[in-house]
Image (cartoon, rainbow, N blue to C red):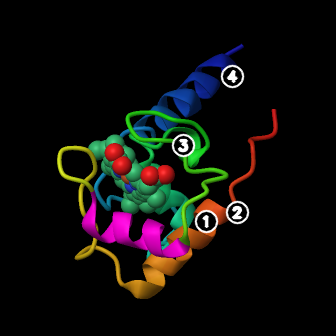
């Protein structure tokens, strides 16, 4: 019964992706997946350590799912951040990237159990 060890290795590997990796593809990511902005992965690695559970619940930052904020407000917050609370991402993302992020936030649904 050596299969058990295999399972443990897989669980251990997924821990690494919970860390705020800076633009480092996770080991085992198929080549070619990082050329386009993958908004799910981006959110998980860049925003997720403050906006928990993909933005579904509050963490260090507020919950983003079901936000009442306007697109303009969200865009402004992402571009400019908030002093002492959230970093500015205006030089990290272009307009199209931020459109994608806004779309991602608007499309958030409670996670299925
Ligand atoms: C270091 C922690 C941190 C990171 C990283 C972070 N945020 Fe935030 N974010 C915050 C905090 C704290 C606030 C609340 C700011 C305030 O007091 O108005 C916030 C506010 C926001 C808001 C406005 C929510 C509202 O209702 O006021 C949006 C939208 C948002 N963040 C999106 C993002 C996105 C997208 C990313 C990744 C690109 C990101 N944040 C990364 C901490 C963070």
Q: Main secondary structure of the magenta part?
A: helix
Q: Secondary structure at mark 3?
A: loop
Label whose residue precedes the other's in the sequence (3 or 1):
3
- Residue at disc 2, CB closer than 8 Å to ligand 1: no
- Quarter of the C terminus within the rendering: top right
The residue depicted at 24 percent of the width and 63 percent of the height is 88
Reply yes or no: does residue 24 show up in magenta: no
Q: Secondary structure at mark 2?
A: loop
Residue 71 versus residue 29: which sits nearer the camera?
A: 71
Residue receiving disc 4: 3
Cβ–Cβ under 8 Å for marks 1 and 4: no
Residue receiving disc 1: 104
Residue positioned most to the top = 1
* Mark drawn on residue 107: 2
Query: Picture coordinates of residue 60 (x, y %)?
Result: 38, 34
Mark 2 neighbour class, 10 Å CA radius: few under 14, some 14 to 19, many 20 or more? few
Residues under labels 2 and 1: Cα distance? 5 Å
Residues under labels 1 and 4: Cα distance? 38 Å
Q: Is residue 111 above or below residue 24?
A: above
Q: Quadrant of residue 1?
A: top right
Q: Secondary structure at mark 1?
A: helix
């Amino acid at each position: 019964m050596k299969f058990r060890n295999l399972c443990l290795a897989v669980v251990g590997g997924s821990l690494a992706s919970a860390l705020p990796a800076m633009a480092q593809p996770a080991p085992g990511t198929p080549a070619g997946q990082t050329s386009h902005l993958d908004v799910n992965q981006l959110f998980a690695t860049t925003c997720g350590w403050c906006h928990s559970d993909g933005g579904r619940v509050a963490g260090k930052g507020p919950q983003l799912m079901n936000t009442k904020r306007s697109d303009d407000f969200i865009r402004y917050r992402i571009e400019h951040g908030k002093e002492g609370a959230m970093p500015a991402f205006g030089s990290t993302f272009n307009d199209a990237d931020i459109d994608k992020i806004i779309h991602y936030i608007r499309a958030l649904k409670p996670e299925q159990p």
